[in-house]
Image: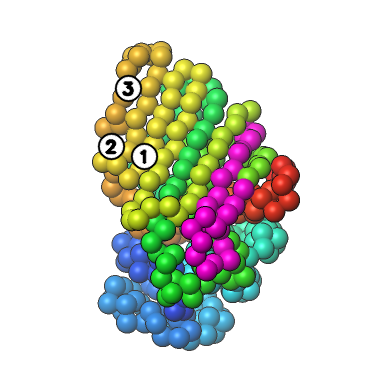
Amino acid sequence: MTDNKIKVGVITNAGGAHVGAYLQGLAASPECEQVVLADADGTWEKPARDELGEKLTAVYRDYGEMLRREQPQLALVTIEARLAPPVIEAALEQNCHVFAEKPSCVRVDDFARLVDLADRRHRYLMLALANRTNPEMQAARGLIAEGKIGRVFGVEAHIIADQTRLTSPDYHEKWYAQKSRAGGGHLIWLGIHWLDLTMYVTGSSIDRVSGFTANVGGQPLDVEDSAVAALSYDGGFLGAITSGYYLDRSYHSHIKVWGSDGWLLLEPIRDQPLRWYSNSGATDGEVVVWPGEKEPRGYTPFVRAAVAAVADMTDPPISNADSLRALRTVYAIYEAAETGRTVTLE
């Protein structure tokens, strides 16, 4: 941490996702000296004042006016995916770095255009894939990079949430339950996190996909509640993911990585979220339980990392290229499901 301080502009409205968590993250970020809020319908003004106190220095209804008058160094954009691209573009045109709630588009080409603009302006465009900064994910990435399980042979992941939420008429009206407003369903809302993590912890990008999507629960939705995909990675190994709303409550989730010298298992919901086995070295033949702490985790450390990266111009928690890569992977799976063909990513 340095003495550098920045101003953060939050752009949101009633449809903003995870706004409370983002406000908590900004409140906890020492490099965030001021927050200015553009809240089109006034939904978040009181929560922002309660959470941020004197850090909140101005409130606007129009995000364009806020960007022009306040010139924040970082814009945190959390609005409906369909509406996000022009907002992100406006922030980049004002020379802001951008932290964006996923998926921030309903067409991947729109986000690719924004990444190109961010790259040309030397700005960060960070998609909010916050599980990256969880301590067990950092530890797993380090273990694989160190060769603890040898050369990666394969990956299997699943992220399963509750079907119960899909039965609510109120949920049916939300933007993330409508394809024209969200771009997709479970895969683009939750599965994207696990797709990104398989690439992040292994250090390899997905380069080909095939898959299927379905509405297995039969709720009146035009987005998928179930997706499966076969994945090819540029590191020379294969993987698979299951992404769906199946449970009555809570989550089931894991990522397992097999290597030439052992394996590694991530189970973020459990008290002991990381175990690994190696057939060589000091722990030859033993299953090792990671001794680290689970906290801090979630959106607060990810927001803090994003703010610190902008303040100090250090590496962000997710790069422009990785943000686009995660979205390209999701949309490639959707294309594969629609066409029945394997899709090669750019």
Residue 148 lies in quadrant? top left
Residue at 70% x, 60% y is 109
Label 2 and label 1: CA atoms lie apart by: 8 Å
Residue 195, position in %: x, y? 53, 45
Which one is in front, 90 or 308?
Answer: 90
Which one is in front, 293 or 152?
Answer: 152
Residue 59, position in %: x, y? 41, 84
Q: Secondary structure at mark 3?
A: strand
Q: If you read the primary sequence from the N terminus, does the residue marked by circle 2 or circle 1 appear first?
A: 1
Q: Secondary structure at mark 2?
A: loop
Q: Which residue is mark 3?
A: 287
Q: Which residue is mark 1?
A: 267
Label 3 and label 1: CA atoms lie apart by: 15 Å
Query: Which residues make up the magenta segment?
Result: 212-235
Residue 286 lies in quadrant? top left
Q: Is residue 177 visible?
A: yes
Label 3 and label 2: CA atoms lie apart by: 13 Å
Q: Which residue is mark 2?
A: 272
Q: Are marks 2 and 1 in contact (CB under 8 Å)?
A: yes
Which one is in front, 206 or 335?
Answer: 335
Say left or right for 42 vs 97. left
**Badge 3 amino acid:** Val
**Badge 2 amino acid:** Gln
Residue 141, position in %: x, y? 45, 35
Q: If you read the primary sequence from the N terminus, does the residue marked by circle 3 or circle 1 appear first?
A: 1
**Badge 1 amino acid:** Glu
